[in-house]
Amino acid sequence: MKVIQSGMTQGRFIMTLERRKFIKSLLNIGAAGLIPWKILASNKSQKHTPLKKDPRKVLNLHPQFEYSIVQKVGDHMSDKLSTPGFPDGMGCFPGTGDQIILMRNHEINYYQWHLAGAVPFKLGAHFPGGVTRLVWDEKKRYLVDSRQTLKNTLRNCAGGISPWGWLSCEESLIFGHGHVYLCPTDLNDCMNTQIIESYGRMNHEAVCIDPRNNYAYLTEDRDDSCFYRFVPKNKNQPFVGKLQALVIKDEEKFTTYSKFDTKKTYQVKWVDLDNQDEDDLRFQGQRLGAAVFKRGEGIFFDSNQVYFCCTTGGPVEKGQVFRYTPDKEEIDLVVQSEDPKALNMPDNICLSPDGDLVMAEDGEDCHIRVLTSSGKLITLAQNVNTSNEIAGVCFSPSGQTLFCNLQHEGITVALHGPFHRLNYF
């Protein structure tokens, strides 16, 4: 495993990946403008279509949708290993023909790996987290290949797609962990992972990349977290640069989880951080006036804007989704839960090709909710084991399949249906 430090040149590996243009097609860099979402106040105006009960007792679904099981914990993979448990964040990349490449995290920590239901990784591995690579045939709906691609990591929670492959984030700082890892998606390169030290050591949750300049935006799963970005010195050396924290202009240490005005757009600035090997980045930022976010989690880049959620933010501590617009240096609130029956702790998020916001819940009653671009809130699915987290929502490049993970059950699922018609439901 290579280590990428802030003062190093990335070399042939990064430059080779830069030339893989097909990955960049995943990153929407159009100029669609602000999507006219409405702020969600409560569930009183939301009428959800009753979900159909699943006889297999896996996932209750909206009547117009169906699902396929991609893989379960304990299944034998193509490399003769058993499928690890606790699947979490995922990214979807184009493969050959009708094939899709799924890069899947496993949020297994040092003390619970024996509960994962399978021997997680190869003999000799010291730590049980990691990433697996799956190849799924979208047309025939079957698993072509699956194998381990990253090992010896801890609590690989979420991450993000990038022009260079999958970025996997560790949500743990014990034993020197707490890093972001670059995982190539090509089968021949998938074990050539790299630590991106310049993205900082923290309780990482997720990351997204603005492909116009290779700025990275990062969330941190803490009750007193900051929102970060990494600014490269130049686009061709994306991991050499400086780490920064977001500040609300004229508002020192602004508590976004309690003071954010749902009708207001706030101007922001950024402060530079000293990227040390210590868990103090949020403290550094807040000493310089950085805004405080409550449990920053899923993040997604679309149409030149960054969307990210705070799982326990807002007046009832059941979640907020923010939108940061780099071109205007401003931030606003897309959706905020004021009733857990409407939205309960959004965690992983993504946007559909039609611009609908998909949110996987991590609360007491776990659903996949969709906030359409016209402001409708739709319940798409529910974990039959209602208290267990849904994670890893991501669309195939065609937009015809939505993938997700049922984390505690250890099941990866593909959802099929009329995603292009959600605004008409």
Image (spheres, helix red, strand yellow):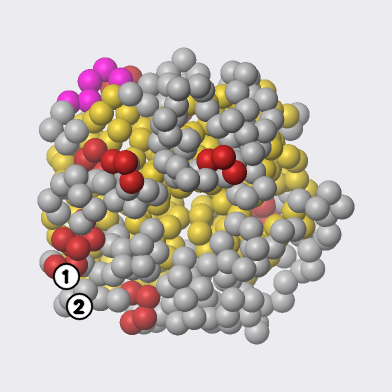
The kind of secondary structure element at disc 1 is: loop
Q: Is residue 383 magenta?
A: no
Location of mark 2 (residue) = 251
Q: Quadrant of residue 272?
A: bottom left
Q: Is residue 370 left or right of residue 221?
A: right
Q: How far apart in space, not on screen, are marks 2 and 1 (Cα)? A: 8 Å
Looking at the picture, how far across and down is residue 53, in whole percent? 83, 59
Tell me the tag on residue 34: none
Frontmost residue, 343 versus 170: 170
Residue found 53% across the figure and 67% down from its top: 345
Tell me the tag on residue 289: 1
Looking at the picture, how far across and down is residue 176, in whole percent? 28, 41
Count of numbered tags: 2
Which residue lies most toward the top here?
Answer: 188
Q: Amino acid at mark 2?
A: Glu
Q: Is residue 290 left or right of residue 339?
A: left
The kind of secondary structure element at disc 2 is: loop
Q: Nearer the viewer, mark 2 or mark 1?
A: 1
- On screen, residue 228 above or below 379: above
Residue found 59% across the figure and 76% down from its top: 340
Looking at the picture, how far across and down is residue 62, in whole percent? 76, 59
Q: Quadrant of residue 5?
A: top left
Residue found 24% across the figure and 38% down from its top: 197
Frontmost residue, 153 versus 266: 153
Q: Is residue 132 left or right of residue 201?
A: right
In magenta, the rendered stretch is 9-14
Looking at the picture, how far across and down is residue 101, in whole percent? 56, 30
Q: Amino acid at mark 1?
A: Gly
